Image (cartoon, rainbow, N blue to C red):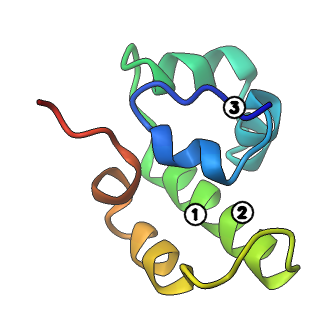
Amino acid sequence: MRASCGQYPALGRYFKTLDELASSACMSRRQCEYCLHGIKEFTRAQKTAIANAIIVKMVAKEIDSREMLIILKAREDFDDIFKKKAA
C-alpha cells in the first residue's frame, strides 16, 4: 500500500506509508497529513529533507534511480515536481 499523498500525488511513488514520509521530513504524521491535504504548507527545510530522503533511497537502490536529475531539481522546485496541478 502506498502513502495517500493528497495534493502531492507524486510522493506516493517514493514512500510506502505516511509514517515513512513524515519521518523523512522530521515531522509528525498529523502535521504531514495537514500539509498533504493543503491545510498547512511544508517548510523549505521539510521539502529539502523529503527530496534528500528520496535521493538516499535511489543511491541505496531501494527505488529506481533513473529520475535522479528530476529529484535533484525537486530540492529547489518541490511544488513544481510533486504538487498536483489545479485544473
* Residue 53, label in figure: 2
Amino acid of disc 3 = Ala
Asked whether disc 1 touches disc 3, contact meaning CB atoms under 8 Å apart, the reply is no
Asked whether disc 2 touches disc 1, contact meaning CB atoms under 8 Å apart, the reply is yes
The label nearer to you, 3 versus 2, is 3
Earlier in the chain: of badge 3 and badge 2, it is 3
**Label 1 to label 3, Cα distance in Å?**
16 Å
Picture quarter containing residue 7? top left
- Label 1 neighbour load within 10 Å: few <14, some 14-19, many 20+: many
Residue at 54 percent across and 79 percent down: it is 67
Up-down: is 3 above or below 54?
A: above
**Is 75 displayed left or right of 53 in the figure?**
left
The percent coordinates of residue 44 (x first, y second) are 43, 52
- Label 2 neighbour load within 10 Å: few <14, some 14-19, many 20+: some
**Is 32 displayed left or right of 10 in the figure?**
right
* Residue 3, label in figure: 3
Amino acid of disc 2 = Ala
Earlier in the chain: of badge 1 and badge 3, it is 3
**Label 3 to label 2, Cα distance in Å?**
15 Å
Considering the image in quadrants, where does the C terminus appear?
top left
Amino acid of disc 1 = Ala
Considering the image in quadrants, where does the N terminus appear?
top right
Report how many numbered discs are placed on residues in the image.
3
Residue at 50 percent across and 52 percent down: it is 47
Up-down: is 26 above or below 36?
A: below
The percent coordinates of residue 77 (x first, y second) are 32, 64
Residue at 72 percent across and 63 percent down: it is 53
Residue at 47 percent across and 38 percent down: it is 9
The percent coordinates of residue 61 (x first, y second) are 85, 79
- Disc 1 marks which residue? 51
**Label 2 to label 1, Cα distance in Å?**
5 Å
Picture quarter containing residue 56? bottom right
